[in-house]
Image (tube, rainbow, N blue to C red):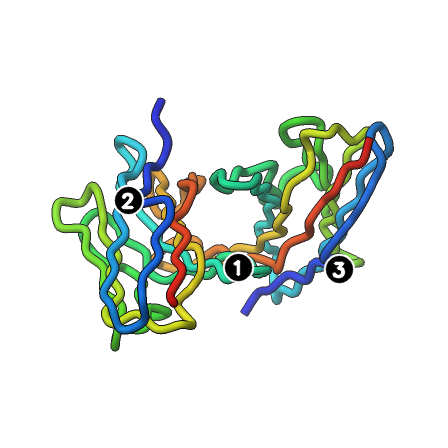
C-alpha cells in the first residue's frame, strides 16, 4: 500500500519568509501525489497535484512542490508566507484501482505564521 | 457554484445514542465519499459511492455504521449506537467520476459524551 509521511507536525514561520513543508512517500510505482490545505471550520482544498508530468508542480496561492523520485519526496514550498497561509496541510498519495482513486492522507502539518 | 453541503456542522450526543449526518454533493457529481478525521490525523475513507452503488465500503465498521445514497444524489451516514471513540469530524466529498478531483465539505464535528 502507498503511504506518506509528513516529517513535521508543526512549522512556524514569520510573515514574508519562505515556507517548507516536508513529505516523503512510499510507493511501489509512480504515484499520484497531492497537497491539500484545511483552514479552521472549512473544507479541505486542493493546492496542487503531481501525476507524472512535470516534476515541479505549481499550485494555487503561490505554492509549489517538487517531485523527487530519488529522494521519494514531495515537499511543499512558498517563497513568502502570508498570514492567511496559517492552516493545516496534508500530503496525500493516491492508489488507483478499478473502483477509482483512494486518497491516503498524511497526518498533517500545522503551519503557524507570525507577524 | 455551491460546494459540498453537510449538516449538521456540530453534534453532541451521549454514548449509545444514534446519530445521522447528511451530505449534499456538488450538482452533477456522481461520486460521493465519506471520510473520518480523528483529532490530529488525516482523513480516512469510510465509504465511496458511484451513483447509488457503494463501490468501496471496506473501511466502514458495519456493526454500528451504515450509509445510504438512495437516489444517487445526497447521502446519509448513520452511527447506532455511538461510542466515545466515535468523536471525530466526518467529512463528505464528491467528484465527477471515480478519478475526478475530490471536493470536500466543511465536515460534521461529532462529540460523544
Q: Quadrant of residue B34?
A: bottom left
Q: Which residue is mark 1?
A: A104
Instruction: Using a 10 Å C-alpha cutoff, classify the residue at mark 1 as few (fewer than 14 neighbours), some (14 to 19) or many (20 or more).
Output: many
Rate crowding at label 2 as few (under 14), some (14 to 19) or many (20 or more) other CA atoms within 10 Å. Answer: many
Chain ID of residue with mark 2: B
Mark 1–mark 2 Cα distance, whole angstroms, equals 21 Å
Q: Is residue A56 above or below residue B57?
A: above
The quarter of the picture where the C terminus of chain B appears is bottom left
User: Residue at (37%, 69%) from the top-left corner?
Assistant: B59
Mark 1 or 2, closer to the camera:
2
| Quadrant of the frame with the N terminus of chain B | top left
Determine which residue is flagged by label 3: A7
Which marked residue is nearer to the observer: mark 3 or mark 1?
3
Q: Residue B53 in the image: state x and y as whole percent.
A: 20, 55
Q: In the image, which disc is placed on residue B23?
A: 2
Q: Is residue A85 above or below residue A21?
A: above
Q: Are marks 2 and 3 on the same chain?
A: no
Callout 3–callout 1 Cβ contact below 8 Å:
no
Q: Earlier in the sequence, mark 3 or mark 1?
A: 3
Q: Chain of mark 3?
A: A
Question: Which label lies toward us, 2 or 3?
Answer: 2
Amino acid at each position: 500500500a502507498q503511504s506518506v509521511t509528513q516529517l513535521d507536525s508543526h512549522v512556524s514561520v514569520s510573515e514574508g519568509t519562505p515556507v517548507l513543508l516536508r513529505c516523503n512517500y512510499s510507493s511501489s510505482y509512480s504515484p499520484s501525489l497531492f497537497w491539500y490545505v484545511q483552514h479552521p471550520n472549512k473544507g479541505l482544498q486542493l493546492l496542487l497535484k503531481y501525476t507524472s508530468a512535470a516534476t515541479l508542480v505549481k499550485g494555487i496561492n503561490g505554492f509549489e512542490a517538487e517531485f523527487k523520485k530519488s529522494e521519494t519526496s514531495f515537499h511543499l514550498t512558498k517563497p513568502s508566507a502570508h498570514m492567511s497561509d496559517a492552516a493545516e496541510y496534508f500530503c496525500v498519495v493516491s492508489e488507483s484501482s478499478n473502483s477509482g482513486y483512494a486518497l491516503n492522507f498524511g497526518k498533517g502539518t500545522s503551519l503557524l505564521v507570525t507577524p | 457554484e455551491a460546494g459540498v453541503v453537510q449538516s449538521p456542522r456540530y453534534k453532541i450526543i451521549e454514548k449509545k445514542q444514534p446519530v445521522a449526518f447528511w451530505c449534499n454533493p456538488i450538482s452533477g457529481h456522481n461520486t460521493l465519499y465519506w471520510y473520518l478525521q480523528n483529532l490530529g490525523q488525516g482523513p480516512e475513507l469510510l465509504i465511496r459511492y458511484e451513483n447509488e452503488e457503494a463501490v468501496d465500503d471496506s473501511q466502514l465498521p458495519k456493526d454500528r455504521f451504515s450509509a445510504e445514497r438512495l437516489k444517487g444524489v445526497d447521502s446519509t451516514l448513520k452511527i447506532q449506537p455511538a461510542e466515545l471513540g466515535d468523536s471525530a469530524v466526518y467529512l463528505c466529498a464528491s467528484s465527477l467520476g471515480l478519478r475526478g478531483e475530490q471536493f470536500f465539505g466543511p465536515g460534521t464535528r461529532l462529540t460523544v459524551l
